[in-house]
Amino acid sequence: MKSLFESIKTIYFQDRRVILWVMGLFLLGGLIVLMTVMNLAPGVADGMIVRYSDGGGYEKGGWGYMLCFAIMGVVLAVLHPFLAVRVYEKRGGSITVMFIVASMVLALVVLLTLMRLVGES
């Protein structure tokens, strides 16, 4: 853990653009978690549209299905920045930025899917 914080300090002093990208990824992941928690309705048994079905259209389900979005947001906000620090140590700044941008694209896809499902319910 000590080496992790030393690596973060090194990244901060050597390559601040990576820190800015990581902060953006953290904010996107936090937004996903916040939207999911605000739209959970545990009192509603099966009235929420939570996923797409194979037969076309949407499928109703319980609020537990919405937790996958919160878990994905936590993974993107917490785990991916730690992975980015390790990628920076091994490969350098440009590969790290590519990794973070790919993670941000994934976060945007999750966020857009969540917004669409919330808008349909």
Image (cartoon, rainbow, N blue to C red):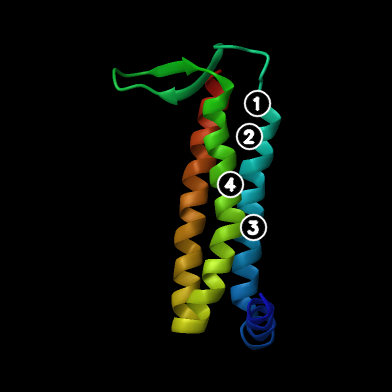
Q: Is residue 98 above or below residue 44?
A: below
> Which comes before the other along the chain, label 1 or label 3?
3
- Residue 30 in view in this figure: yes
In the rendered image, the vertical position of residue 85 relative to residue 102, given as above or below: below
Q: Are marks 2 and 1 in contact (CB under 8 Å)?
A: yes
Q: In the rendered structure, which disc, 2 or 4, sits on the residue that comes first in sequence?
A: 2
User: Few, some or many C-alpha atoms within 10 Å of disc 3 (few <14, some 14-19, many ≥20)?
Assistant: many
Report x, y in % for residue 77: 61, 55
Amino acid of disc 3: Phe
Q: Which residue is mark 1?
A: 40
**Mark 1 and mark 4: Cα distance apart in space:** 14 Å
Kind of residue indicated by mark 2: Thr
* Mark number, residue 26: 3
Find residue 43 and report its horizontal and vertical position in percent.
68, 14
Distance (Cα) linking label 3 and label 2: 15 Å
Distance from the alpha carbon under mark 4 to that under mark 3: 9 Å
Compared with 68, 1 (above or below) is: below
Residue at image mark 2: 36
* Quarter of the rendering containing residue 6: bottom right
Q: Where residue 88 sits in the image (x, y, percent)?
A: 51, 79
Picture quadrant where residue 81 is located: bottom right
10 Å crowding of disc 1: few (<14), some (14-19), many (20+): some
Instruction: Choose between 93 and 63: the one closer to the eye.
Output: 63
Mark 2–mark 1 Cα distance, whole angstroms, equals: 6 Å
Of callouts 1 and 4, the N-terminal one: 1
Residue that carries the numbered disc 4 in the rendered image: 73
